[in-house]
Image: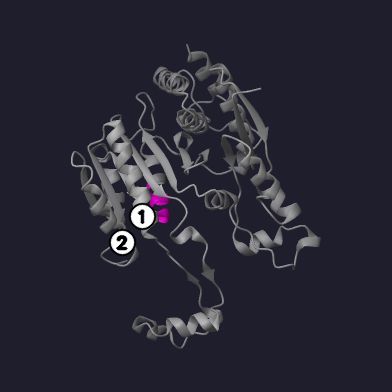
Amino acid sequence: MAEYKIAWLPGDGVGGEVLDAAKRVLDRVSLDAEYIPGDIGWKFWKSEGNPLPQRTVDLLKSTDACLFGAITSKPKEEAAAELAPELQGKGLVYSSPIVGLRQLFNLHTNLRPCKAYPGNPLNLRDDIDLVVFRENTEGLYAGVEFHPIPDQLRRALESHPKMKRFSDIANEDMAISTRIFTRKGCRTIVRDAFEYAKNHGYHSVTVVEKPNVIRETSGMMVREARAIAKDYPGIELWETNVDAMCMWLVKNPQHYGVLVSTNMFGDIISDLAAQIVGGLGFAAAGNIGDDYAVFEPTHGSAPKYAGQNKVNPIATIRAAKMMLDYLGEREKADKIERAVAQVIAEGRVRTYDMGGNSSTMQMAEAIASAIK
């Protein structure tokens, strides 16, 4: 029997191709694992009305971790139009399966390392090494939304003085998406960020919010960060507004170590941070909870490239490396990290986004061959 059971979720578009590339590298380091495929994504939304079938949820419960490829997501009306004819008109509403996994398994911490590898022609600078911690289950992505506005909610909101300017807007002409923070959620993500900074030698943690405007939710996040920072006297707490953070990341990203933010702001700044070290082809993420974790590249399904064996698999290979760290296989993880750095530095193998013409699997083979 294998030591580990890994849920294997290719998903849509190029998801299967990049997972196959990661599997080549995992095989090279001889990970003793059974990879168990599962169903997720657009195909199952169209045919079953559920992009995250219960059988897949049950599969994950029987495994040690999950490696996830990519999914296609579309707006509400477009998604409904692509349902099989027998499913249309039944009130089915599409929701992102990766967001669903995060909430079902309480994968509260989204960890996104953004490291510049010397030799990468896409780096903004070679001395960037920062990490984004993103709260993963609350905020604007919690999915508590309304359209049209229910009468009961409308009456409750009308007691707020700033709702007066909307008083003549009909319920069907208004939509509301809630931004829900909990004290526990704020504390968990901030403490995870400080613990990571302490364990990996970073000297600062920057909380990225907008408390001067979004006073209650961002205010709670900042207040909790200030309280938790007192437990880490050797690590500075910096505070910045999310709009200013975007500017500073472009101007001097090398000044930052660990960034921590809530769900939507964290999503935005992590993609920006990814671009300054080469783009989403290098951007991996871990969705980590107390008892389970899902690892993924952060790029989408790229349907226009599906089947072409073209896209950069390094993000997925780095996600596999993060999974090894999570499983405690740090020697194998370090081998992959060194091999990725070596292949990028040598520059002989480059995918299209790096200005080359190497295929997805050629990049994977080069990284696997570099593993000693």
Q: Is residue 61 above or below residue 181?
A: above
Instruction: Give the SS element for disc 1.
Output: helix
The residue that appears at 66% across and 22% down in the rendered structure is 1
The residue that appears at 54% across and 84% down in the rendered structure is 151
Which label was assigned to residue 186? Answer: 1
Residue placed furthest toward the bottom: 168
- Dot 1 or dot 2: first in sequence order is 1
Give the CA separation, mark 1 to mark 2. Answer: 8 Å
Main secondary structure along the magenta-highlighted residues: helix
Viewer-closest of 148 and 323: 323
The residue that appears at 49% across and 28% down in the rendered structure is 324
Whether residues under marks 1 and 2 lie with C-beta atoms below 8 angstroms apart, the answer is yes
User: Mark 1 belongs to which amino acid?
Assistant: Cys
Residue 30 found in image quarter: top right
**Residue corresponding to mark 2:** 220
Magenta span covers which residues?
Answer: 262-269
Instruction: Give the SS element for disc 2.
Output: helix
Residue 159 position in % (x across, y down): 39, 85
- Residue 337 falls left or right of residue 359: left
Q: Is residue 343 above or below residue 310?
A: above
Residue placed furthest toward the top: 372
Residue 29 position in % (x across, y down): 53, 17
Viewer-closest of 141 and 105: 105
Residue 308 position in % (x across, y down): 64, 32
Which label was assigned to residue 199? Answer: none
Residue 13 position in % (x across, y down): 63, 41
Viewer-closest of 198 and 47: 198
Q: Is residue 15 above or below residue 157?
A: above
